[in-house]
Image (cartoon, grey):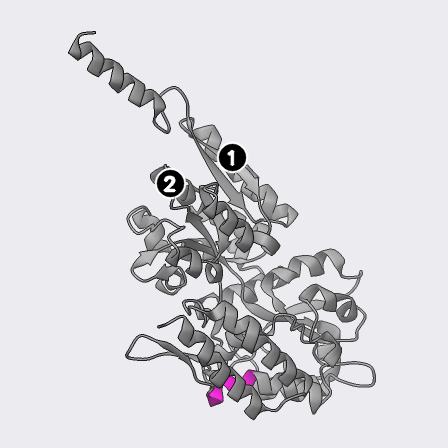
Amino acid sequence: MPGKALVVLLLLLAGCSSPGHRDGPITLRFQSLAWQQESVAANKDLVEEWNATHPRVKVEYVQGGWDSVHDQLLTSFEGGEAPDVIHDASDDLADFAHGGYLADLTGLLSARLRADIPRGSWDSVTFGRGVYGVPFLQEPRVLIADSTRLRAAGVRIPTPEHPWSWAEFRQATKRLSGPGRYGVAWPLKEPVSVTLNLSLSAGGRLFHRGADGKVRVRFSAGDAVVPRTVHDQVAVDHSAPASTLGSGGSDTLPGFFAGRYAMVPLGFSYRQQIVQQAPEGFRWQVLPAPAGAGGLAQGVSPQTLSVAADCPHKKEAAAFIDFLLRPPNMVRLALGDWMLPTGTEALRDPALHTTENGWATGTALAARLRPAPAQSVRGYAEWKDKVATPAYQEYYSGAIGLGELRSRLEKDGNLVLARYQR
């Protein structure tokens, strides 16, 4: 065969064997963790709309689950079978980012998207100099309250403009308590994230990065406000039952509806379950969490969209993420999940400012949300499981005092973190 003809043939063969060749569209696998019916519908509808208008880049919807996502992703990364576009949460990204499993999106995101999401939200997905996800939904913790009980007790109703202090909150729960009835129920099956995120409102930080770049645990007066409040409500005031300390949020709803608890601190999205499950005539409202030296600040771990490092079509994957997170689409995703969008334009949508079901209260908190304190701490997972969770559980149950809690978090905790920072 003549040399020129051979070169042409080789070029044609190379073109036919490359990903996304001209004979067919590129296919991206998008793994979504949406689970509520409205949220799943919103995600699937957006995938269909993308496919209808992008014939050269098709997206395949893959259903995942929150309970198993970390292990499932780790297995798929190591096996070379990871989805191209990955739905997760910012507090799950650090190990994947440092492990080289996620693509750095710094040069792939549109200027519109970068400008629309506030810097604080980007901080939650930035590790080193790279950006490894796009934060798009966030969930403040609020107080879901029995309106009838609050008014009968004559307590002041807090608002985002005039919230309760932590001391006022404790007094209110005492007034709302009585024989067989409690002012608040704390579902603390996962005590660490709840405590650390709410402690930002009291000026607590717990994790401190030194001049050497290493992170150490230091339990200050601000870090003690929230745990002491919960402990005293359970063990001193008896305005909170010890029986819910090991429960999840959903476990407290039957007692809330039955009048056993006047308030329950829950994630903002729990409003959907309340709308679906509350008995007829039950009146409830959304109140902001208490404020302290840090105002209404609280930590959150936004839901994120990332691109796998092995994805051969990173630009197309980033374009699909940009489409999903156009302001009108971000509003649809937020409404479907009963959460808040991170985008500033989406947050202005009137649908998120209605008083119905407490939307306006939650939206008023958006500017106070900060990345969760442990967001970028290497070794946090082990510290949480081996040190912090048992320490907080024992303190809240009354088995140990505040001094022992401080000692365990600092002494034992810093030994764990040191191994990850050698």
**Mark 2 residue element:** helix
Left or right for 278, reference 346: right
- Residue type of the residue flagged with mark 2: Ala
- Residue type of the residue flagged with mark 1: Glu
Reading the image, the residue beneath label 1 is: 60
Dividing the image into 4 quarters, which one contains the N terminus?
Answer: top left
Residue 93, image x, y percentages: 44, 58
Indicate whether 417 appears above or below 138: below
Q: Residue at x 60, y 74 (%)?
A: 191
Residue 320, image x, y percentages: 42, 40
Residue 397, image x, y percentages: 68, 83
Indicate whether 172 appears above or below 5: below
Tag count: 2
Residue 106, image x, y percentages: 30, 52
Reading the image, the residue beneath label 2 is: 319
Q: Residue at x 67, y 86 (%)?
A: 233
Q: Of circles 1 and 2, which is in front?
A: 1
Callout 2 crowding tier (Cα within 10 Å): few <14, some 14–19, many ≥20:
some
Q: Residue at x 44, y 47 (%)?
A: 325
Callout 1 crowding tier (Cα within 10 Å): few <14, some 14–19, many ≥20:
some
Measured Cα–Cα span from mark 1 to mark 2: 15 Å
Whether residue 309 appears in magenta in the rendering, the answer is no
Indicate whether 347 appears above or below 422: above
